[in-house]
Amino acid sequence: MVTAIVHINAEVDRIPEVAQTIAEIDGVSEVYSITGEYDLLAMVRVAAYEEIAEVIPGRINKVAGVLHTETHIAFRTYSKHDLDAAFSIGFPEAD
């Protein structure tokens, strides 16, 4: 699984529609409205790196109202669930 974090600048008056359209794209798992330099953050999860090109420049960048994107590819994924499992290996669960 390849995960990409996509920061998106959108036309201010179209942010909700842009977010909804992006959320409906295959490979996009979540879209958040965020504060700061960017308007939206999209989580893209695909099976292979080649699919990143199809989803981000091929689909997200072409959504009406998208002005600019910046993409970051994740090397590893860490989650509370993963960390809890890693640190509990070999230890009995506490009652």
Image (cartoon, rainbow, N blue to C red):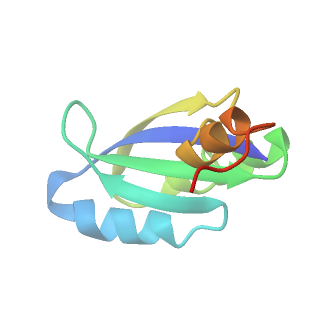
Q: Residue at 67% across / 52% down in the picture?
A: 45
Q: Going by the image, does 61 lie left or right of 52?
A: left
Q: Quadrant of the C terminus?
A: bottom right
Name the one closer to the observer, 44 or 90: 90
Q: Going by the image, does 48 lie left or right of 83?
A: right
Name the one closer to the observer, 4 or 92: 92
Where does residue 76 sit, x and y in percent of width and height? 69, 30
Where does residue 16 sit, x and y in percent of width and height? 25, 67
Q: How many marks?
A: 0
Q: Name the residue at the front extreme.
A: 95
Q: Is 3 placed above or below 37 here? A: below
Q: Going by the image, does 71 lie left or right of 35?
A: right
Give the quadrant of residue 78: top right
Name the one closer to the observer, 2 or 64: 2
Q: Residue at 23% across / 30% down in the picture?
A: 37
Q: Going by the image, does 31 lie left or right of 60?
A: left
Q: Residue at 62% across / 37% down in the picture?
A: 83
Where does residue 19 sit, x and y in percent of width and height? 36, 63
Give the quadrant of residue 67: top left
Name the one closer to the observer, 22 or 83: 83
Q: Is 87 placed above or below 42 here? A: above
Q: Residue at 48% across / 60% down in the picture?
A: 30
Where does residue 68 sit, x and y in percent of width and height? 39, 37
